[in-house]
């Protein structure tokens, strides 16, 4: 520690016996080492010509136990930004010099949530302190680019069923008033159509295993997450959804009201559970769409359900046909896995509920949204 010099004192007062050693005037800063077993305390006084008379006693903070580092495999981002490339490199160097003894998650949180975002940016990602510091040190020697399209906002992507996990959103319920209020609004909108609360089922593996529960829960969580992002000032340029994620995307875009969207997701998932459950399934195949089409050409009742990437295609259909697809993949060394559902989404089987679904959703009128909605099927 350091004891700062006393301000505005040129000559010590003659009214004090400075030679006794009991009191010493700090005419310049001096080191203040910590004593063994002793806590450092200091009195700070302020006396003003108008009558100010204040005195504060301060004490050094106790040392905190070091927090454990995140488990191996977790990835932590450290985000930096500055008004110039040189300032960004200097900031990276300063952070590298002080972050050696800090918890990497705390550093990442503080950088992301407490600092302004400027035009020149960099991010380092690592699984532990050593990796992060190594990458951080390299920032000072690289060419830093200016943020591109900073005024264009971001695109929010809403996933389909399968992205859920037990406990999703529960921490945010206690830490984010925006998220909690949105979840309560979604739960109220769903209440005429379901016999559960989406707030209560987030921690139940059994409940989230039911299609008529998990799809409304995912819708509520995704809509609420979008509201959190927007409350932080994130500009949304467009939304896109996959499968039932399009319901959440339409809600955030403003094309569906919360009440209408709740009706769609609740009644649609209920019909899937009541009419389609047990009739089929889905399989993810690590091949391109073209190769999967050839693979299933001789398999009746199976079709391409979704193209998730250049080498990731989902097929759906009757259980017997899917067994043939899995066997063919095993024999040819192609990675494939059965998706944990007992119905064939995005297949001809959904035509079985078409008319009934149109009936229960009669009266819903799409609105003109305020955010562009990008379709994944047109």
Image (cartoon, grey):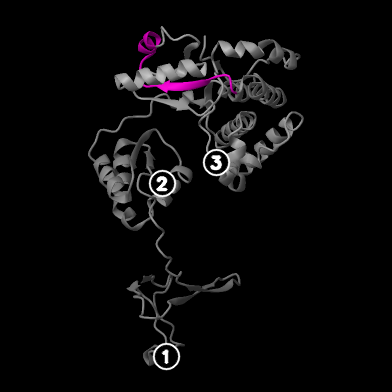
Q: Secondary structure at mark 1?
A: loop
Residue sitting at x 59%, y 36%:
208
Specify the segment rendered in magenta.
278-295
- In the image, residue 198 above or below residue 332: below
Q: Whole-Å distance between the Cαs marked 1 and 3? A: 71 Å
Residue 176 place in picture, x, y as percent: 60, 44
Q: Is residue 310 visible?
A: no
Q: Which residue is mark 1?
A: 17
Q: Is residue 281 magenta?
A: yes
Q: Earlier in the sequence, mark 1 or mark 2?
A: 1
Q: Earlier in the sequence, mark 1 or mark 3?
A: 1
Quadrant placement of the N terminus = bottom left
Q: Secondary structure at mark 3?
A: loop
Residue sitting at x 43%, y 70%:
7
Q: Whole-Å distance between the Cαs marked 1 and 2? A: 53 Å
Residue 269 appears left or right of 122: right
Q: Quadrant of residue 183?
A: top right
The label on residue 108 is 2
Q: Is residue 343 magenta?
A: no
Q: Which residue is mark 3?
A: 166
């Amino acid at each position: 520690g350091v004891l700062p010099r006393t301000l505005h004192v040129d000559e010590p007062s003659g009214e004090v016996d400075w030679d006794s050693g009991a009191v010493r005037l700090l005419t310049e800063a001096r080191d203040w080492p910590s004593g063994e077993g002793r806590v450092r305390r200091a009195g700070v006084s302020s006396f003003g010509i108008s009558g100010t008379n204040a005195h504060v006693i301060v004490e050094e903070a106790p040392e905190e136990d070091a927090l454990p580092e995140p488990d191996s495999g977790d990835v932590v981002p450290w985000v930096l930004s500055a008004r110039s490339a040189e300032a960004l490199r200097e900031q990276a160097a300063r952070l590298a010099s002080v972050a050696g003894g800090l918890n990497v998650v705390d550093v990442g949180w503080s950088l992301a949530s407490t600092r302004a975002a400027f035009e020149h940016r960099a991010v380092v990602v690592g699984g532990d302190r050593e990796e992060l510091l190594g990458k951080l040190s390299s920032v000072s020697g690289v060419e830093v680019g200016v943020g591109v399209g900073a005024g264009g906002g971001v695109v929010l992507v809403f996933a389909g069923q399968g992205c859920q996990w037990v406990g999703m959103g529960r921490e945010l319920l206690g830490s984010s008033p925006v998220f909690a209020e949105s979840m309560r609004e979604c739960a109220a909108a769903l209440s005429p159509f379901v016999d559960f609360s989406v707030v209560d089922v987030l921690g139940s593996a059994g409940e989230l295993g039911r299609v008529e529960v998990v799809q409304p829960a995912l819708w509520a969580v995704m809509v609420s997450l979008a509201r959190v992002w927007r409350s932080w000032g994130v500009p949304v340029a467009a939304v896109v959804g996959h499968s039932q994620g399009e319901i959440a995307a339409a809600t955030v875009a403003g094309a569906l009201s919360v009440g209408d969207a709740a009706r769609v997701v609740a009644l649609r998932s209920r019909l899937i559970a009541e009419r389609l459950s047990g009739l089929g399934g889905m399989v993810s195949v690590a091949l391109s769409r073209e190769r999967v089409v050839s693979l299933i050409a001789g398999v009746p009742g199976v079709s391409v359900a979704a193209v998730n990437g250049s080498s990731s295609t989902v097929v759906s259909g009757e259980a017997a046909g899917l067994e043939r697809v899995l066997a063919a993949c095993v024999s040819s060394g192609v990675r494939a896995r059965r998706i944990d559902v007992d119905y064939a989404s995005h297949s001809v089987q959904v035509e079985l509920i078409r008319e009934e679904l149109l009936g229960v959703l009669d009266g819903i009128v799409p609105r003109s949204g305020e955010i562009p909605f990008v379709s994944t099927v047109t």
